[in-house]
Image (cartoon, rainbow, N blue to C red):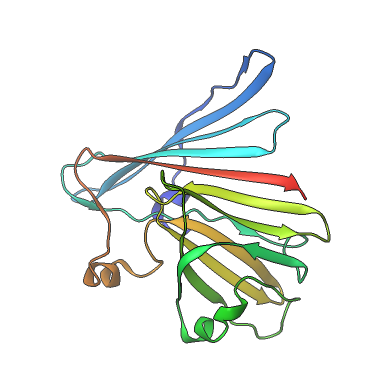
């Protein structure tokens, strides 16, 4: 939503959907390239897939530095949730190893990051960076559930690919939203990330793969 590539139309858009036995597998793909003369050159190859009748959507990305010099590489998956799943009856099921508030305002409410309220006038956003516990292979996940309406929303990813989860808690009137956003680095300016020596880079020709799964289920 905030990067240059979000405004660049995809090319090589294709529908690879097909029957596999009695199941219809939906597979949609496309490629976006972000690059300019003397600048960085990054390519995103995305496939979105599901199986008809199931409750899961999978996003599989291959990100490649197709240029000739080392390139900064920051990525965050915006998954933003609102009413009616998000309400005062919702709760965040999360098991962090470490939680870091982004601001003093967020720090003052750190004990409440798992719970939510009705829309509040004058609410200032709370942002937290979570490092989650994971399986040995790195698989982890987070859930927003609302027992009153009987729905749970799961996000599954791998901390070897996306080591952080950014939580954006915004309880404001008219701006009532919860962002649960797997990412590879905190949402800070690249100059700051470089100064802190945590800015990721891709070498020329290097590729990484990210996988995110979204599951909607009854509880």
Q: Where is residue 206 in the image (x, y as percent from the top left)?
A: 24, 40
Given residues 163 and 120, the one toward you in this image is: 163
What residue is shown at x 49% (from left), y 71% (from top)?
128
Q: Position of residue 5 (x, y in %)?
A: 41, 49
Q: Position of residue 192 (x, y in %)?
A: 28, 72
What residue is shown at x 64% (from left), y 83% (from top)?
123
Does 4 sit left or right of 54 as displayed?
left
What residue is shown at x 62% (from left), y 23% (from top)?
25
What residue is shown at x 38% (from left), y 56% (from top)?
184
Q: Which residue lies furthest to the top in this view?
A: 21
Given residues 143 and 14, the one toward you in this image is: 143
Q: Residue furthest right?
A: 148
User: Looking at the picture, does residue 44 appear above or below residue 22?
Assistant: below
Given residues 87 and 121, the one toward you in this image is: 87
User: Looking at the picture, does residue 114 appear above or below residue 109?
Assistant: above
Does 205 sit left or right of 153 as displayed?
left
């Amino acid at each position: 939503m905030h990067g240059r590539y979000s405004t660049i139309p995809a090319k090589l858009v294709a529908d690879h959907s097909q029957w596999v036995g009695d199941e219809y597998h939906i597979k949609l793909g496309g490629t976006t390239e972000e690059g300019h003369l003397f600048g960085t050159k990054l390519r995103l190859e995305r496939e979105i897939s599901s199986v008809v009748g199931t409750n899961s959507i999978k996003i599989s990305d291959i990100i490649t530095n197709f240029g000739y010099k080392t390139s900064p590489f920051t990525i965050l998956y915006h998954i933003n949730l609102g009413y009616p799943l998000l309400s005062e009856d919702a709760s965040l099921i999360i098991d962090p190893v470490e939680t870091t508030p982004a601001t003093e305002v967020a720090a003052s409410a750190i004990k409440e990051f798992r719970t939510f309220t009705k829309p509040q006038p004058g609410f200032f956003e709370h942002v937290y960076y979570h490092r989650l516990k994971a399986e040995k292979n790195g698989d982890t996940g987070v859930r927003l559930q609302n027992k009153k309406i009987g729905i749970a929303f799961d996000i599954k990813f791998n901390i070897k690919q996306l080591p952080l989860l950014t939580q954006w808690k915004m309880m404001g009137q008219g701006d009532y939203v919860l962002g649960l956003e797997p990412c590879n680095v905190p949402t800070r300016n690249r100059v700051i990330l470089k100064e802190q020596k945590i800015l990721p880079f891709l070498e020329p020709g290097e590729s990484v793969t990210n996988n995110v799964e979204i599951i909607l289920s009854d509880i």
